[in-house]
Image (spheres, rainbow, N blue to C red):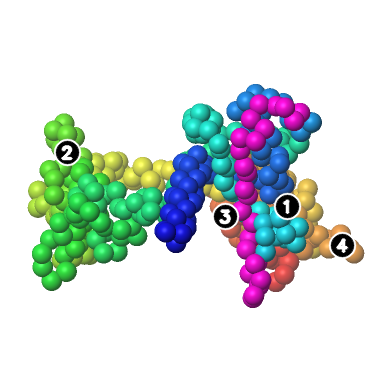
Amino acid sequence: NSKMTMMGREQCNTSKNVAEDFTKKEFKIHISRVPTSFTEESVERILRETLFQVKDTSNNDESEGKESMIVELIYPKEEEEGEKHDKEKEKETNTEDHRGFGFVTFDSRDIYEKAIQIQSIKGGRKSTSTKLRTMYLRPYATQEEDAKRNICFLWTKNRCPYGDKCKFEHRGDGGCLEVPSGDGKNPKKKGKCFAFKKGKCNKGNDCPFSHDFEPVVDAEKSEKGEHRLVSEKHCINWKTKGKCKKISTCPYKHDPEVLERYLAKKKRKAGQHDNSTTENGVTEQHKKQKQQQPLCIRVFGMAYETTEQDIRTYFEDCGKINSIQFPTYEDSGRSKGYCGVWFASPKAVAKAVQLDGQELHGRWLSIQVGTMLLEEWEKK
């Protein structure tokens, strides 16, 4: 009988412990985003200020909810062989910061529900701190509940596209998307082809996206030539030049009518060019060339005694002279035997060229049309 009573007492004690553990789990929440500079006392102070709206509870022993919560921050574990540290001893020996999260256990359901409802708390490391940090609260979940969270949501909706490669578990009622049967050469497409939707995709079966829908093409744009396939567009070289080097491999269209229009346009331009000639056989291009005649002449074969004033007097009857380039020797100041003369009109240049071969100071002059390249002549 004594053994039976002892066993009954042990069963009662174990049932009480289980009930206590259950209530602790039931009123336990998870707190995250805790700054490493915060301690358990600072977190408890912020919780009391938020839940009970009581400030500076450090010196108030009779404040509301003084013994109604237990804050436990998680620190990195340091296991040693043959030793088990108590929680208080571990805090004293551990100099590292906590891991940024922890658990808070409440004694009443009302405070627990209020903490879950506010979802977040904000406060500083000290009651006088101006920099406030936000920490988040959520219900505590056991390992069994976490295991339920690992079930694939798409699997429950019968549309998981990943199959065996899915990172989540496929348990219970659900399914994956149907994969087309075959040797695996044509796997399921990723999504709808954006180019095919506009009627522009020319990759066909090689396109990695799906073409299992009707393209949306505007009727007005299709009449204007937009949203057409490449094979329906005219080759730009064929259209503007009448030829294409890649005619065998070119993906664009080579229409004979387009070629005929190009040839007709070319003949029309050639006819206009022929009609532009004058009765004397001089074209407009030749007229422009006449207007761009040089206004300068080069004079060679002069005597050393000839001066710049002699050249100005010699060509004075031809027309107005704008300038004369007359190079001389530095030591004697005499002429180097050549010079350049700039006139105001092409007619004056034509008259000056007619004096080619005439005599000046006993020397026969050589007169040419063109600019005087003084630097090149001095090098020679």
Query: Do the residues under discs 4 and 1 have CB atoms within 8 angstroms?
Result: no
User: Which numbered circle lies on residue 145?
Assistant: none
Q: Mark 2: few, some, or many residues within 10 Å (few <14, many ≥20)?
A: few
In the rendered structure, the answer to whether residue 311 lies left or right of residue 151 reads: right
Crowd band around label 3 with a 10 angstrom C-alpha radius: few (<14), some (14–19), many (20+)? some
Disc 1 marks a residue whose amino acid type is: Gln
Query: Which residue bears the numbered disc 2?
Result: 216
Which image quarter holds the C terminus?
Answer: bottom right
| Circle 1: element type | strand
Answer whether residue 68 is magenta in the image.
yes
What's the mark number on residue 330?
Answer: 4
Q: Secondary structure at mark 3?
A: strand
Of residues 295 and 170, the one drawn nearer to the viewer in this rendering: 170
Of 239 and 170, which appears nearest the observer? 170
Q: CA distance from mark 4 to mark 1?
A: 15 Å
The question of residue 47 being in magenta is answered with: no
Instruction: Identify the mark nearer the N-term, 3 or 1.
Output: 1
Tell me if residue 252 comes above or below residue 292 in the rendering.
below
